[in-house]
């Protein structure tokens, strides 16, 4: 800065402070440098008026940064200096900043007291002073009324808040300050949102954003976008909410507005909760709680802790949730947030119900209903009334309570609430035997569900969202089977299938996005992903005592990945099917229903169903026994001269028990099906080696050529076969546990003339990604790892780094047969949609994937793989080729551990998926 003369210094300070004030929201760091410079010059010159102004600008910057105690001290300084300089109106005006900071600190009643005193003082000043002072006093009073609206809203006085915002907006307009109407508009949107009126709220937010942008105020425009995101979330438009949150985050991050960044994290946590991404929600809420506590933002800390408790409730950690609710409730009481105190009562009722304390839960739910009703908070009020219906002592009471809330649900027209209400109503009708009406309500519940899913831009979000909302599908399956009308069994099977593989069908039909390319994403996501890859490599050298850091990094990448989706457009509401599809492949499809298994047998002319009661628990125990069998076989083959052959009998006994549990009860329905059988497993059944199951005489592969599929197949069901002169890509990465993998890869490549061979150092992620486009068969032999907590991080170890499922879906595998000679490549999460490595390759367009469900010694694997590829090269379809290789192993007396791990998983082609993308309407055939 140049040294001014005595005459022009006041003008210079005024100019600098004008510039600083204009930069507070647009460039706060530049504003601070100017304000501090002016502060020092004014203090040295004993210029009280300009010193006061400099302190007030600095207080605004401190407020944005979250340094609230420092902001209050600067505001007090400014008031004192203006008072001493005789500027009464300017001194009074500092109360506006004080109100803002008090609200940020959760001291809302103090803010109201300050605002009401200020409003009265300004009214008096406006009538006593000259005309210019009167105009300025009206302007400051409009600000005061607007700030009073904020404080009123934060303590649940919504009607007074809306009235205050309307008065402030009218006053600004009357004074010709049209740009100033944006804040009352934005705050009106927040009040409407709290009252369950998101459509009106969005209209207010959109008008406010337009004015903020016209006034070149990016900070307030960003804050308003974050608020608008919550309206979209309430409407079930999560994709649009993510887009707005990402836009707002980028703006606020550039501006260094830490206070608003905390609130944006809370909004992001709420959005993650709405989707069902509990880990990501917990990470966002937990970091917001820490940041808010460190900045003294008591109200925001309370909201963050409340969201953490909701994560606990979602994961059925009810005890932990109740502890967190107690802490959040104390903070809400401290700041007198009545709406959140009512929400705490509701969440407490949910936690008590989860612990089985139903009497206490009813009492807490009744308290929540009363508080929410008194406050007019309609959205959580519906949730409280639905919970109270769940806690009813008899069906008649439940029906009465559901009927009482029906009009409110219809008026709000929010898909998530509609889904929950329709589901509960259907359950009551089913208990009364009114199955036609129950089916109608369940179909409407599913329509509401897909309406909410319609805006999700990415398969990972869709999978998470649907995974936690499968109850209506399960209820509809049971209702249709109970009703047993013409076509009901087939309709029930298709409903069960829809919940199993809907997202895969959406992906293949291009009705769902594949998400960002992690390794080439923006700086924050790309750097986090690089850090995660480095952690994976570090673990190979020195495995950590606990996987905490790896899991934390995976959660961070997942959260950033979700945030990155904010720039992606959603596909819109996915249309409902016009009719159900025919299943032409002889198929045995399972559906888990509580402790029971439902088995659907699809024959060319009909569909039949059979209930296997109470078998789910026994299935889990038998699969544990089977794991023990495989462990014993692995140890014996490595350390005993006789190998695992003496253990074949005990393994067959467990395989016989599994056969008796899963196949024998439907054996009569499988008679005459022909030589091929497709099995569609559900839940944990994905680890069942169906081809190896034993009926006491032979393994099932001796009776049928068996394939597996994630969903019913609606084409001719032929397994993929290679064309003449097939283009093959073969990759092999040996390690200490599988030193012969490179030899396997070379042997496989030798079966396919002209094959692209990527062996050892050549088998990088980039080389494989570049080579697979247009391939007919892709063989990958390497180490594989299943990640049960987040299957998108299940991965294959190539030479340079790990290739996770989240990157696999980006590959171009249109119509290729993929062979994964990697342990755990066939393992997937036990959730409804079987996401894992095989699923990811199918989602990338593979026609089929040969997978390995557990670790097998690489020498034996190489023999099976060589036999498979010799048959494939001769034109044998993949299912027959795999069966022939496995039968050779059986004939050679090998233990099932060595050959039973391999299975062919067939997926729908893109053409098939187009006909399968819409939600089945079971009433078409059944009502």
Image (spheres, rainbow, N blue to C red):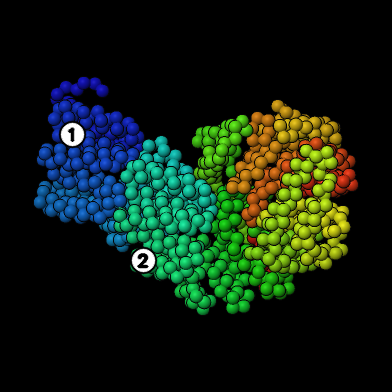
Which residue sits at x=24%, y=28%?
A: 37
> Residue drawn at (13%, 44%), measured in percent from left and top?
88
Quadrant in which residue 595 is drawn: bottom right
Residue 563: percent from left, percent from top = 51, 44
Of 900 and 645, the residue lying toward us: 645
Residue 609, relative to residue 135: is it above or below?
below
In which quadrant will I find the N terminus? top left
Mark 1 and mark 2: span between their CA atoms? Answer: 49 Å
The quadrant where residue 200 appears: bottom left
629 vs 309, left or right, is right
Instruction: Reply above or below: 47 against 492.
Output: above
The tag earlier along the polypeptide, 1 or 2, is 1
Residue 387, percent from left and from top? 47, 67
Q: Percent x, y for residue 582?
A: 76, 62
- Residue at the image point whose x is 14% and y is 24% from the top: 6
How far across and how far down the image is residue 638, in percent?
77, 38
Count of all numbered marks drawn on residues in the image: 2
Q: Residue at x 60, y 52 (%)?
A: 463
The residue tagged with tag 2: helix, strand or loop? helix
Residue density around tag 2, few if under 14, some if 14–19, many if 20 or more, within 10 Å: many
Lateral position of residue 804 relative to residue 144, left or right: right
Q: Quadrant of the C terminus?
A: bottom right
Q: Which residue is mark 2?
A: 371
| Residue 244 visible, this orientation | no
Residue 298 higher or lower than 765, as above or below: below
Q: Nearer the viewer, mark 1 or mark 2?
A: 2
């Amino acid at each position: 800065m140049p040294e001014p003369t005595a005459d022009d210094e006041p003008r210079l300070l005024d100019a600098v402070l004008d510039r600083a004030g204009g930069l507070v929201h647009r460039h706060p760091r530049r504003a601070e440098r100017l304000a501090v410079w002016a502060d020092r010059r004014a203090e040295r010159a004993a210029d009280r008026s300009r010193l006061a102004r400099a302190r007030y600008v600095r207080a605004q910057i401190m407020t944005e940064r979250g340094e609230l105690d420092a902001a209050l001290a600067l505001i007090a300084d400014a008031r004192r200096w203006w008072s001493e300089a005789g500027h009464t109106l300017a001194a009074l005006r500092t109360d506006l900043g004080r109100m803002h900071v008090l609200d940020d600190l959760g001291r809302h009643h103090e803010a109201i007291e300050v605002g009401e005193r200020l409003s009265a003082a300004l009214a008096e000043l406006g009538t006593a002073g000259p005309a210019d002072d009167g105009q300025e006093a009206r302007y400051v009073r409009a600000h005061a009324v607007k700030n009073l609206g904020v404080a009123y809203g934060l303590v649940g006085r919504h009607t007074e808040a809306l009235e205050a915002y309307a008065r402030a907006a009218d006053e600004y307009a009357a004074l010709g300050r049209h740009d100033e109407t944006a804040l009352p508009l934005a705050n009106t949107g927040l009040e409407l949102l709290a009252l369950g009126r998101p459509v009106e709220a969005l209209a207010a937010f959109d008008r406010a954003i337009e004015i903020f942008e016209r006034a070149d105020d990016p900070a307030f425009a960003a804050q308003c976008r974050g608020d608008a995101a919550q309206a979209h979330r309430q409407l079930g438009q999560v994709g649009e909410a993510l887009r707005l949150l990402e836009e707002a985050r980028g703006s606020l991050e550039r501006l260094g507005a830490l206070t608003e960044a905390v609130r944006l994290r809370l909004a992001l946590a709420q959005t993650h909760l709405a989707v069902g991404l509990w880990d990501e929600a917990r990470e966002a809420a937990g970091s917001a709680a820490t940041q808010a506590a460190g900045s003294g933002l008591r109200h925001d800390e309370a909201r963050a802790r409340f969201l953490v408790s909701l994560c606990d409730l979602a994961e059925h950690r009810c005890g932990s949730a109740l502890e967190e609710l107690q802490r959040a409730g104390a903070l809400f009481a401290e700041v007198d947030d009545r709406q959140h105190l009512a929400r705490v009562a509701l969440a407490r009722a949910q936690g008590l119900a989860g612990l089985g304390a139903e009497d206490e839960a009813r009492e807490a739910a009744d308290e929540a209903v009363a508080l929410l009703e008194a406050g007019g908070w309609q959205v959580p009020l519906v949730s409280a009334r639905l919970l109270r219906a769940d806690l009813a002592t008899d069906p008649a009471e439940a029906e009465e309570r559901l009927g009482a809330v029906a009009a409110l649900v219809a008026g709000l027209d929010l898909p998530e609430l509609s889904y929950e209400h329709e589901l509960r109503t259907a359950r009551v009708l089913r208990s009364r035997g009114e199955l036609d009406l129950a089916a109608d309500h369940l179909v409407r519940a599913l329509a509401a569900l897909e309406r909410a899913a319609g805006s999700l831009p990415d398969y990972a979000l869709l999978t998470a969202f649907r995974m936690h909302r499968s109850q209506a599908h399960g209820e509809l399956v049971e209702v249709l089977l109970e009703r047993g009308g013409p076509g009901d069994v087939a309709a029930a099977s298709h409903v069960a299938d829809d919940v199993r593989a809907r997202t895969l069908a959406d992906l293949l039909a291009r009705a769902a996005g594949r998400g960002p390319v992690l390794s080439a994403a923006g700086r924050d996501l790309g750097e986090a992903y690089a850090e995660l890859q480095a952690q994976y490599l570090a673990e190979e050298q020195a495995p950590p005592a606990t996987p905490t850091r790896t899991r934390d990094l995976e959660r961070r990448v997942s959260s950033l990945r979700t945030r990155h989706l904010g720039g992606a457009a959603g596909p819109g509401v996915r249309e409902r099917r016009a009719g159900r599809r025919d299943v032409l492949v002889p198929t045995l499809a399972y559906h888990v229903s509580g402790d029971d298994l439902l088995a659907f047998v699809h024959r060319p002319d009909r569909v039949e169903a059979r209930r296997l009661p109470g078998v789910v628990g026994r299935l889990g125990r038998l699969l544990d026994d089977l794991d023990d069998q495989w462990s014993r076989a692995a140890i014996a083959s490595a350390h005993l001269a006789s190998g695992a052959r003496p253990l074949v009998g005990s393994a067959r006994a467990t395989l016989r028990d599994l056969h008796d549990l899963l196949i024998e009860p439907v054996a009569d329905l499988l008679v005459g099906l022909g030589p091929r059988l497709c099995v569609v497993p559900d839940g944990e059944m994905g680890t069942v080696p169906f081809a190896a199951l034993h009926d006491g005489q032979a393994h099932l592969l001796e009776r049928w050529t068996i394939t597996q599929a994630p969903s019913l197949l609606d084409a001719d069901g032929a397994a993929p076969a290679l064309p003449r002169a097939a283009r093959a890509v073969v990759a092999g990465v040996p390690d200490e546990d599988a030193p012969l993998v490179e030899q396997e890869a070379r042997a496989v490549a030798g079966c396919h003339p002209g094959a692209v061979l990527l062996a050892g150092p050549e088998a990088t992620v980039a080389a494989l990604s570049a080579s697979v486009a247009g391939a007919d068969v892709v063989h990958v032999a390497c180490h594989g790892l299943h990640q049960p907590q987040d299957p998108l991080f299940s991965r294959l170890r190539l030479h340079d780094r790990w290739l996770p499922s989240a990157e696999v879906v980006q590959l171009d595998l249109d119509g290729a047969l993929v062979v994964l000679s990697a342990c755990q490549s066939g393992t997937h999460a036990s959730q409804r949609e079987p996401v894992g490595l095989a699923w990811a390759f199918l989602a990338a367009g593979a026609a089929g994937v040969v997978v390995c469900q557990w670790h097998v010694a690489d020498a034996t694997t190489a023999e099976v793989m060589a036999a498979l590829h010799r048959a494939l090269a001769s034109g044998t379809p993949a299912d027959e080729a795999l069966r022939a290789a496995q039968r050779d192993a059986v004939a050679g007396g090998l233990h099932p551990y060595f050959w039973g791990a391999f299975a062919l998983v067939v997926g729908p082609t893109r053409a098939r998926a187009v006909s399968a993308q819409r939600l089945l309407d079971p009433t078409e055939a059944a009502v």
